[in-house]
Image (cartoon, helix red, strand yellow):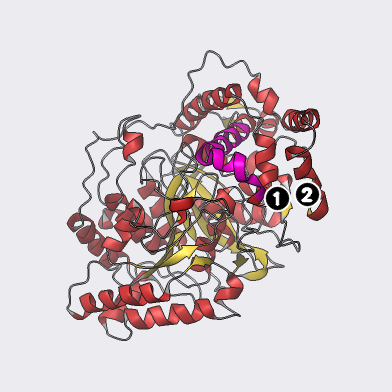
């Protein structure tokens, strides 16, 4: 049979697949400097008829009134992306013994099992654990080294990956790690391993603000305790080294923040890192730390991971507790997950988070808890990582893949998919319906969450925010309750679409982004609003956020002219993160890695 499979199992023609894979037309000017200031003035301060008409025009031209008027009244709205349970749910217990014994077994199995292809690559978690065990280095020496790097004008300061760094606290915690190692009682293989945390999350002692200048009051004071994900890592012995750069309130995808300046790509400092978890991607990509925590509401783990040449995992929605942090952003599309330099490190850090950061108790009141996860099975993971593609059905929406803007992204993605096929995968042509509705609905969901999280802080203090942030929010305050309900009805449809497709394939594979990392705009004060650029960056991200399915980014190539990384994006059914980790382990030996500059 010919033609691409859609979610109901039927096949469609190539012409219909091309229509479905073609992105919608975006109508918005590219603005910076004076023109951006003028545009924001029109949205915020012009006489009210001008403000209203301009906003209505932009929303109409970009499809949001079309979304509002779709005939979807027969569809039940889904406020959250709930996935069916694969095992009976039981309350999570925040204990350390099971986590640490599992982590030790996992570490023993994966260390050295998948040596990444490349030379002069940064150290892995296994490298740190081995060096500590052999007494070649101490956590205090690591802390001093990181302090020196972050203070170096040509290295850490040039990268601009961290916004909150406390050398005294770092040394104090390194001393405690050293004592446990010296006594022969490390908490886990993560003992003394440096890990960074996105500014969106609370880490005890560190002061974060979600990248904004809004007056957050007590919420922006140094955190009195860790959020659940940070606590899980700290309880396993990880050395928390600071809070990383993020775009303002997480609304940007380039890595620019007018309050902190641009976060720069470790492969080429003239280019951005992607966002919003810019500093987490840059810190790991540069080798400052082997892993970092990040958050993802619209690709914010996977975009910077891909742009910085490392791995990024967005778990199933609700799998890991999100927050708390200074602002409760992205309620229905947000996820917390790891960015790591290597596949084994991604598995190790995720295994700690999996058992130590229980589901958000607020969400548990709204719907059943996710299934109690089994600890990652080291034997199963390594065996599946050796031949994860054998017999697997890999769904590829070829027409959507070929719609990527950068030809090198298309070529690298096709080459990676050919490697999967050579290792036994069956490549299944698929088509995904409703992509335009999904893109628009995600915008409604995420920006509505931002506005809800800020509340009066935004309406009373928006003048202190960056112009690029104000421009985006100034348009989207025109969303109505009808937009919100429609977006949730589209989520219901999107869940049916992905679940239907996963009846026919095991994975869905796309490029990570349509382009490589964009060059940093010369106007650092105002930044640049470029809707088309942002859409190209987020093109393949939004399906996984709106539906809550897990997804992973893996580095596969480098752009010829710039040396910038190119990544592949793999999605799996809800709760099946272990399958994604197995593909990452496989990829380490398939695609050559280059060290950052």
Q: For the residue carrying disc 1, how many other residues have a C-alpha within 10 Å: few (<14), some (14-19), or many (20+)?
A: many
Q: Residue at x 30, y 31 (%)?
A: 368
Circle on res. 36: 2
The image shows residue 390 at horizontal and vertical percentages of: 41, 49
Residue at the far bottom: name it. 136
Does residue 26 show up? no
Residue 29 seen in render: yes
Mark 2 residue crowding within 10 angstroms, few (<14) / some (14–19) / many (20+): many
Q: Is residue 97 left or right of residue 581?
A: left
Picture quarter containing residue 98? bottom left
Give the secondary structure at mark 1: helix
Which stretch is magenta? Answer: 439-463
| 2 or 1: tag closer to the N-terminus | 2
Is 463 above or below relative to 484?
Answer: below
Viewer-side residue, 391 vs 497: 497
- Where residue 128 appears, as percent x and y from the top left, is 34, 75
> Does the residue at mark 2 contact the one at mark 1 (Cβ under 8 Å)?
yes
Image x and y of residue 235, in percent: 26, 61
Horizontal placement of 26 versus 414: left or right?
right
SS at mark 2 in the image: helix
Residue position for label 1: 467
In x, y percent, where is residue 143? 39, 78
Is 361 magenta? The answer is no
Dominant SS of magenta comes to helix
Q: Quadrant of the C terminus?
A: bottom right
Q: Between 33 and 319, which is closer to the camera in this rendering?
A: 33
Residue 245's image quarter? bottom right
In the rendered structure, the answer to whether residue 37 lies left or right of residue 426 reads right
């Amino acid at each position: 049979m010919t033609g691409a499979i859609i979610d109901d199992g039927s096949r469609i023609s190539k012409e219909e697949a091309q229509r479905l894979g073609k992105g919608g037309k975006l109508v918005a000017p590219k603005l910076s400097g004076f023109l951006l200031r003028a545009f924001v003035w029109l949205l915020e301060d012009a006489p009210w008829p001008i403000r209203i008409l301009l906003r209505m025009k932009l929303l109409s031209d970009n499809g949001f009134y079309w979304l509002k008027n779709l005939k979807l009244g027969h569809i039940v709205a889904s406020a959250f992306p709930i996935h069916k349970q694969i095992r009976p749910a039981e309350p999570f217990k925040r204990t350390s013994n099971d986590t640490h014994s599992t982590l030790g077994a996992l570490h023993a199995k994966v260390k050295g099992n998948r040596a990444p292809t490349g030379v002069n690559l940064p150290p892995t978690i296994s490298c740190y654990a081995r060096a500590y065990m052999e007494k070649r280095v101490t956590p205090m020496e690591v802390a001093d080294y990181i302090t020196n790097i972050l203070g170096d004008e040509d290295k850490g300061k040039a990268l601009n990956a961290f916004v909150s760094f406390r050398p005294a606290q770092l040394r104090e915690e390194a001393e405690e790690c050293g004592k446990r190692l010296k006594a022969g009682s490390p908490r886990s293989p993560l003992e003394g391993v440096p890990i960074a945390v996105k500014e969106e999350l609370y880490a005890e002692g560190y002061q974060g603000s979600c990248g904004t200048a809004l007056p957050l009051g007590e919420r922006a004071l140094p955190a009195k305790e860790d959020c659940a994900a940070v606590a899980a890592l700290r309880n396993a012995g990880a050395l928390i080294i600071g809070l990383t750069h993020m775009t303002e309130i997480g609304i940007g995808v380039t890595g620019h923040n007018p309050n902190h300046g641009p976060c720069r790509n470790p492969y080429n400092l003239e280019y951005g890192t992607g966002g919003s978890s810019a500093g987490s991607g840059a810190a790991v990509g540069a080798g400052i730390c082997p892993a970092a925590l990040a958050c993802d509401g619209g690709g914010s783990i996977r975009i910077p991971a891909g742009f910085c040449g490392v791995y990024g995992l967005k778990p199933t929605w609700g799998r890991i507790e999100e927050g708390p942090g200074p602002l409760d952003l992205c309620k229905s599309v947000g996820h917390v997950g790891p960015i790591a330099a290597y596949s084994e490190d991604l598995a190790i850090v995720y295994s700690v988070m999996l058992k130590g950061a229980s589901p958000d108790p607020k969400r548990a009141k709204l719907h059943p808890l996710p299934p109690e996860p089994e600890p990652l099975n080291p034997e199963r993971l390594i065996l599946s990582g050796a031949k994860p593609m054998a017999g697997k059905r890999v769904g590829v929406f070829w027409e959507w893949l070929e719609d990527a803007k950068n030809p090198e992204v298309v070529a690298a993605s096709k080459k990676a998919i050919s490697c999967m096929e050579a290792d036994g995968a069956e490549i299944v042509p698929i088509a995904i319906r409703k992509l335009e509705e999904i893109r628009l609905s995600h915008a409604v969901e995420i920006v509505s969450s931002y506005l809800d999280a800020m509340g009066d802080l935004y309406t009373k203090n928006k003048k202190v925010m960056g112009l690029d942030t104000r421009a985006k929010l100034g348009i989207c305050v025109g969303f109505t309750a009808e937009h919100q309900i429609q977006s949730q009805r589209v989520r219901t449809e999107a869940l049916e679409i992905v679940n239907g497709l996963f009846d026919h394939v095991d994975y869905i594979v796309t490029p990570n982004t349509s382009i490589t990392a964009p060059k940093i705009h010369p106007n650092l004060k105002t930044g640049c609003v470029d809707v088309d650029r942002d859409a190209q960056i987020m093109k393949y991200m939004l399906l996984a956020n709106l539906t809550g399915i897990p997804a992973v980014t893996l580095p596969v190539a480098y752009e010829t002219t710039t040396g910038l990384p190119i990544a592949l994006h793999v999605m799996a059914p809800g709760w099946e993160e272990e399958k994604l980790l197995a593909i990452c382990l496989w990829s380490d030996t398939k695609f050559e890695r280059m060290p950052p500059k």
